[in-house]
Amino acid sequence: EPEVTQTPSHQVTQMGQEVILRCVPISNHLYFYWYRQILGQKVEFLVSFYNNEISEKSEIFDDQFSVERPDGSNFTLKIRSTKLEDSAMYFCASSRTSGYGEQFFGPGTRLTVL
Amino acid sequence: ILNVEQSPQSLHVQEGDSTNFTCSFPSSNFYALHWYRWETAKSPEALFVMTLNGDEKKKGRISATLNTKEGYSYLYIKGSQPEDSATYLCAFPNNAGNMLTFGGGTRLMVKP
């Protein structure tokens, strides 16, 4: 069964460093998303992406964040200068259609900023 | 900011017990409600997408109901098994369907 994959599973970085989190969505999906969960808090939406552009973003998704689909298979989230409060589990998701249907989630990347 | 709430936060039951928990969401501008099951170290897995008031969906021992007029959904697990231990999340999409607002989750632990 096709699944969303994410790498790495755990990333440790120093404050101020750039990180790139990688995702491979399901191959025939066209809509891509990033969410995150800070420990003890709710899962929060960051950004959605379709047709090579951002379709929706939250207040969290400021200039320090960017997303890219560099080729036909990968979808990346870059944090330019990490802060301690960026420590969280980051989830990628994809869906085949827009609208209210199911989003398929990856297993997450745990980012720890020291 | 949408307010999606789940209760209880956590639940401990014995194997064989039936259990249920609640997701409440804004009753105005309803589009759909998603239920996800999230086991530790695994991907959140979609259980149901519910769209119609009065909807009732079932997958094995797990079922869900929806009341859009009063803004709540119940998830029921009949005869809980240890493998049902997970966090159950509900999520409410925006009008464009391109973002989900999640509740805080109910963490279920089933003791053998």
Image (cartoon, coloured by chain):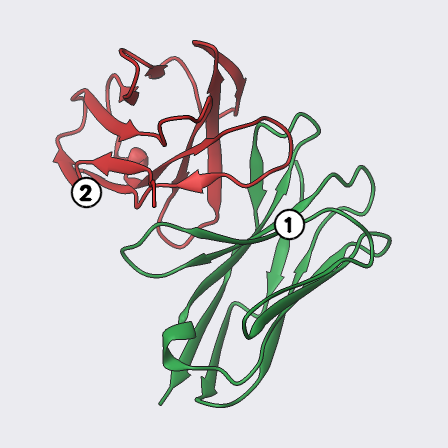
Callout 2 secondary element:
loop
Q: Quadrant of residue B29?
A: top right
Q: Quadrant of residue B15?
A: bottom left
Which mark's residue is nearer the viewer, 1 or 2? Answer: 2
**Camera-nearest residue between A35 and B16:** B16
Instruction: Tell me which chain the residue with mark 2 is part of.
Output: A
Please name the color used to draw chain A. Answer: red
- How far from the left and from the top, in percent, is residue A58? 52, 25
Looking at the image, how many numbered discs can be counted on the residues? 2
> Relative to B56, does residue A99 appear above or below in the rendering?
above
> Relative to B78, does residue A109 appear above or below in the rendering?
above
Q: Quadrant of residue A13?
A: top left
Residue B91 numbered tag? none
Q: Given the current orientation, which residue lies at the most extreme front position?
A: A1
- How far from the left and from the top, in percent, is residue A32? 44, 25
- x 19%, y 20%: residue: A18
Name the kind of residue labelled 1 in the image: Val
- x 66%, y 32%: residue: B94
Name the kind of residue labelled 2 in the image: Ser
Please name the color used to draw chain B. Answer: green
Q: Which residue is mark 2?
A: A9
Horizontal placement of A109 versus A27: left or right? Answer: left
Query: Quarter of the image containing the C terminus of chain A?
Result: top left
> Relative to B11, does residue A17 appear above or below in the rendering?
above
Callout 1 secondary element:
loop
Same chain for the residues under marks 1 and 2 in the image: no
Residue B4 numbered tag? 1
- x 57%, y 81%: residue: B78
- How far from the left and from the top, in percent, is residue A24? 28, 29
Instruction: Tell me which chain the residue with mark 1 is part of.
Output: B
Horizontal placement of A14 versus B24: left or right? Answer: left
- x 42%, y 82%: residue: B81
